[in-house]
């Protein structure tokens, strides 16, 4: 038997099979041989049962906060680099491996009665993510939130302004939307970050390539904003969370914030921070018209897809399609 040192062996192997260079992590607990060689102090339970995948600016923080209020639902520990989001399945964190990912989750005391979850709003529109998630968490439920993509685009632009992004500060929303090849790359990048996540049907199709529709739950973001008690009721039913948590006792509308907030006591609510539910000027008419045209085809595709899957069509989508006729 002829061999070479292990590192050289690895190099030789990947020279022969370059397509295998990019890892695709699977759950070690799904394979007897893997469990057999796994350290005894590792636990298969330290992985999420459901994921809130975004997209950004649709109310993901509100949903994360409401879910975390449930006594049986437990999120990941905070990440020092990405605030509360782990952002494992997109970007470079994936290469840190599944031990790195599992460290973000507690070992549940009672594995059937604890519902671990993770919210990373950037997962929704990254093409590589659905395959990676299905490989590691094939039975996970996937939750996404959809609002009018035009509103989402504007909310992202306002978010970037609030974060002092020089491009968003120096260019109007309309200038960003109109950016073509003659404009600096940073302006085109911002345009893409405003527009691309809102092509909902296209992104959902990627998820459906790897997950059966029954594992997908789509929340109408307008409903999450205006009637979160109902949304949390439906979501608990979908995930089969036990015990049932009656959100009507724990959420109420806060007139000052203009959103639903967590009830602390008779007189006090705890609302999301100033960065969520921002005050800004209404969108200008030219941008609104542009976005209506831009998303027409994408919204029509979304409506077809939801009908085909027998999923409810959000009222904002019905309105957008009615406006187009
Ligand atoms: P705006 O700040 O543009 O109004 P995300 O958490 O995904 O970044 O989404 C932020 C958006 O969540 C906010 O966008 C706001 O409209 C929406 N939202 C929905 N329910 C909310 C709530 N209860 N409190 C605050 N914001 C909420």
Image (cartoon, rainbow, N blue to C red):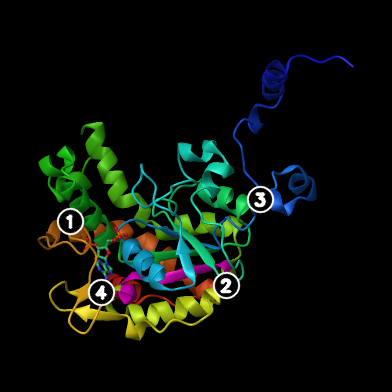
Task: Point out the frontmost of discs 2 and 1.
Answer: 2
Residue that badge 2 annotates: 113
Task: Point out the frontmost of discs 2 and 3.
Answer: 2
Element class at badge 1: helix
The first of marks 4 and 2 along the sequence is: 2
Q: Position of residue 209 (x, y in %)?
A: 59, 56
Q: Specify whether tag 3 is near ligand 1 (CB below 8 Å).
A: no
- Give the vertical position of 217 relative to 175 (above or below): below
Element class at badge 4: strand
The first of marks 2 and 3 along the sequence is: 3
Q: Is residue 223 magenta?
A: yes
For marks 3 and 1, give the CA distance: 46 Å
- State the image quarter where residue 317 is shown: bottom left
The structure residue drawn at horizontal position 54% and vertical position 79%, both measured from the top left corner, is: 242
Ligand 1 location (quadrant)? bottom left
For marks 1 and 4, give the CA distance: 31 Å
Q: Position of residue 185 (x, y in %)?
A: 26, 32
The first of marks 1 and 4 along the sequence is: 4
Mark 1 and mark 4 in contact? Answer it, CB < 8 Å. Answer: no
Residue that badge 4 annotates: 261
Q: Specify whether tag 2 is near ligand 1 (CB below 8 Å).
A: no
Task: Point out the frontmost of discs 4 and 2.
Answer: 2
- State the image quarter where residue 48 is shown: bottom right
Q: Residue 27, labelled with which disc?
A: 3
């Amino acid at each position: 038997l002829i061999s070479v040192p292990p590192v050289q062996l690895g190099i030789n192997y990947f020279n022969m099979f370059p397509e295998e260079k990019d890892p695709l992590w699977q759950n070690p607990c799904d394979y007897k041989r893997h469990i057999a060689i796994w350290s005894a102090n590792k636990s298969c339970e330290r992985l999420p049962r459901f994921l809130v995948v975004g997209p950004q600016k649709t109310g993901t923080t509100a949903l994360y906060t409401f879910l975390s209020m449930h006594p049986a639902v437990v999120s990941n520990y905070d990440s020092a680099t990405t605030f509360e989001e782990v952002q494992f399945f997109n970007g470079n964190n994936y290469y840190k491996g599944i031990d790195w990912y599992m460290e973000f989750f507690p070992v549940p005391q009672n594995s059937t009665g604890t519902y671990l979850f993770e919210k990373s709003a950037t997962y929704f529109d990254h093409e590589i993510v659905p395959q990676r998630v299905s490989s590691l968490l094939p039975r996970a439920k996937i939750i996404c939130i959809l609002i009018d993509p035009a509103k989402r685009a504007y909310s992202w632009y306002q978010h970037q302004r609030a974060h002092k992004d020089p491009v968003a500060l120096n260019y109007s929303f309309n200038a960003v939307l109109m950016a073509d090849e003659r404009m600096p790359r940073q302006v085109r990048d911002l345009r893409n970050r405003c527009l691309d996540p809102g092509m909902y049907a296209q992104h959902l199709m990627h998820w459906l390539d790897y997950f059966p529709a029954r594992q997908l739950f789509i929340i109408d973001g307008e409903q999450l904003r205006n009637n979160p008690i109902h949304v949390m009721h439906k979501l608990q039913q979908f995930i089969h969370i036990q015990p049932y948590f009656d959100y009507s006792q724990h959420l109420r509308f806060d007139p000052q914030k203009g959103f639903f907030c967590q009830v602390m006591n008779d007189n006090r609510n705890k609302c999301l921070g100033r960065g969520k539910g921002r005050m800004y000027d209404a969108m200008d008419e030219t941008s609104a018209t542009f976005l209506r045209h831009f998303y027409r085809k994408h919204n029509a595709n979304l409506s077809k897809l939801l009908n085909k899957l027998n999923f409810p069509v959000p009222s904002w989508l019905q309105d957008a399609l009615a406006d187009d006729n």
